[in-house]
Image: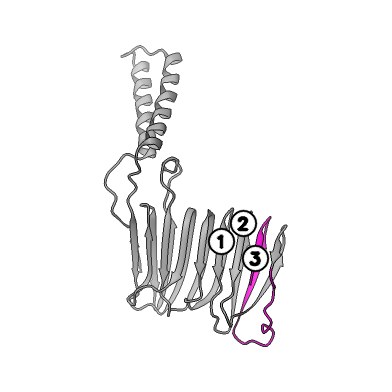
Amino acid sequence: MSDHGRRSARGRDWRGAELLGVILIGIGVVYLLGNLHIVRIAWSAMWPVAIIAVGAFVLVGALRPSSNAASSARVARETAARLELDLSAGAGRFELTGGASPDALVEVASSNDDIATRTDRSGDLARVRLRQDVAWWPNLWRAVAGWSVKVASDVPTVFTMNAGAGDFSVDLSTIVVAGARMQIGAAQARIVLPRPRGTVEMRVTGGASQLTFVAPPGVEYRLEMSGGLTSVDGRTESPGYATATDRVVIRFSGGAASVRIG
């Protein structure tokens, strides 16, 4: 069983992709009319005109006041007792915490109209995918996105995140995390570790990124490194990790990353 949702308050406006489509259709019509000898076309003049038209649309879009509308989405809890949450985000500022409403699994709000969601349910398991839905062309003049994601605090969650070039604040301390996998590109990320039940594994891959792992009081952890030119600031293992039954293992691999932990 699956459901798709996307909620927004955006009115109808011209986007960059649509404007580009109009330009290409116009060029095609003029070219067709020329081939049919209905009009006479001097192509040496047409291409500069087309380039000027594209540039004008981009310039007007960049200079006009932003008309981006905020958007939000909500995934109801229904019968779900387990959650697999997949977040894919390109660019912007993103904040994820626990504390969703009692009857919700996930709640997300954005300063832009760029939220795409998909939910698949199987028994007591809900698989929720959140994706930042932004085409390359409108990005030329869209405002930087600001996302706020809230997750149910009492539902065991496997969390996956694919992060691009943005600023990410991920607080897992109020979420029951059963496991986590994160891929972080050229981004800054602050990740608060979960309060584990048993041994919780977090696999993190970083590119040219700056990562900060924060351990809440009483949380035992170990950071294992592999690959890349990574600098580490802080203790890679907490004092009580070896004897703890509830602990977090962070397995990090990456490129030219800077990691701070503590």
Q: Which mark is residue 91?
A: none
Image quarter in which the C terminus is found: bottom right
Give 124 or 72, whichever is nearer the viewer: 72
What type is the residue that disc 1 sits on?
Answer: Ala
Q: CA distance from mark 2 to mark 1?
A: 8 Å
Q: Please report the residue visible at 47 percent of the width from the left and 78 percent of the height from the top.
A: 156
Q: Which residue is mark 1?
A: 189
- The vertical placement of 65 against 241, above or below, is above
Front tag of 3 and 2:
3
- Callout 1 secondary element: strand
Give the class, few, some or many, for how many residues have Cα within 10 Å of label 1's Cα (few <14, many ≥20): many
Residue 196 position within the rendered picture, expressed as x and y whole percent measured from the top left: 55, 81
Image quarter in which the N terminus is found: bottom left
- The vertical placement of 215 against 67, above or below, is below
Mark 2 or mark 1: whose residue is earlier in sequence: 1
Q: CA distance from mark 1 to mark 3?
A: 10 Å
